[in-house]
Image (cartoon, grey):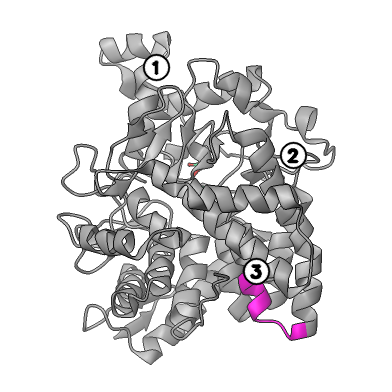
Amino acid sequence: MCSVTRTGTVHVKIQTRYYVCMQIQKMLISQAEAVLKANRVGNATKPAPGLYPHQWFWDSCFIAIGLRWTNIEQAKAELRSLAKGQWHNGMIPHIIFSDELGYHFGPDKWQSSKWSGLQDVQTSCITQPPMLAEAVYRVGIQLSTIERKEWYQEMLPVIIAYHTWLYRERTLGDSPFISLIHPWECGLDNTPYWLKIMRQNIPLKLKILQFLHLEKLLNKTRKDTKQVPASERPEPIDLYIFYNIIRQAKQNGYNARRISNTKAPVIEDLVFNAIFIRANDLLMTIAAEIDYSIDADLVAHCKNTKAKIDQLYEQGTFWSRDVTTGKLIKEQTIANFITLYSGALSTEQAQAMMNDLHGDGIWRPAYGVTTTPTNSRWFLPKNYWRGPVWVNMNWLIIDGLRRYGYHKEAEVMRNQTIAMVANGGVCAEYYSPIDGTPAGSPQFSWTAALTIDLIKTTKLKIATNE
Ligand code: 2M8
């Protein structure tokens, strides 16, 4: 049963939980296209109206992965726009600011032109998960051989400069892994393993507010909760710690080596590194297709990171590492499962992941994977990265499952995800893992784009370069 309201929004009620019929799939694609069109600003797409009025790095990669099915030129433009924001040192920033006002942490807070080498583009001064190689590669698959080669010639130098920057600026000591200086860099902003480390060093002013049980007062000054209920956003103390870490990072020139000598959190983040390992493989695949010779040092680094992933393995699973103490941060979250996407796991490790996925409170019967298990002390069903199901996380896990040959499980999760979005009706930012209620911002671009991609990629041949 489908109905279209007077505002044009498609409301869909489906009979069976995990199967979405062709008619509804078609309507979902139209609904998703309308969301992407409405969120388009110039050559890029904002993640959502109101709450996120600029271009975000990994959002745009997911958006291009969806757009390649409906408007390949826009998919290319989306990624070219990211390349325009690339700093002269190779970093791709997590936000490229548009002229829209109202974001809760705008360009004036960062002052990027002091470091970026760009005078005409304002950006943030930190990065986000390196999804660019995947997006470039998938856009390439849709093109003719000649066009694909041209596309790869154009975009490969951007990817190489970015990965080279990550190795040069973000590997600390002898570690083969990338260090992050802010939870916004991993994209799962208030995920428990970051909160645990961040909350060990709460600034005095915030501690006083906490002591007086007045931290809710902070909600009065925040902008993000004008768009979305406070209960669905990071807790006030955490948001103000996020802001504070940026201020400290700025005082240290956003330099990870300097920051690692302060009390600020620095983490070898599992989600980021898993995505990076996959991105390195794709970089090589793209280079091989156009006979592009990659610098031997970069090749060696890429191989080393993948080969050493077991350094993050303990007690039968993978964890992020706290750079300050050198210890693994043993908080179970969806990060454990994103390692499937890396392609770096042994067959036994992938099987262990499959068993864990079926463990208590993780793979929800109708929706996919919780970002924080329902039995965790951190779990909140509608709060941002503390529990809700996110379509991009399901997408990464589905892709990983396919790569390890778990096609049946991947297909179940694909159908669940499409059904969850269809039932929710608004292309929501995230969904409660308890009952699938939409939460966060409606009209969310990567939900729209990846729903298109999930509907279209039933039989996509997954490339590997092993
Ligand atoms: C969220 O993060 C931004 C900061 O980067 C915010 O809360 O203001 C995260 O969900 C992040 O992963 C996402 O890229 C961004 C835009 O959708 O929003």
User: How packed is label 3: few (under 14 Cα within 10 Å), some, or many (20 or more)?
Assistant: some
- Determine the residue positioned at 39% across, 91% down: 23
Of callouts 1 and 3, the N-terminal one: 1
Which dot, 3 or 2, sits closer to the camera?
Answer: 3
- Determine the residue positioned at 41% across, 66% down: 400
Secondary structure under badge 3?
helix
- Determine the residue positioned at 23% across, 49% down: 373
- Determine the residue positioned at 75% across, 84% down: 145
Which dot, 1 or 2, sits closer to the camera?
Answer: 1
Secondary structure under badge 2?
loop
Of callouts 1 and 2, the N-terminal one: 2
Separation of marks 1 and 2 at Cα, in angstroms: 30 Å
Q: Which residue is mark 3?
A: 285
**Which SS type dominates the magenta stretch?**
helix
Among the 4 quarters of the image, the one containing residue 451: bottom left
Residue range corresponding to the magenta coloring: 137-145
Q: Which residue is mark 1?
A: 201
Tell me whether circle 3 and circle 2 mark residues in contact (CB < 8 Å): no
Residue 372 image point, x, y percent:
28, 47
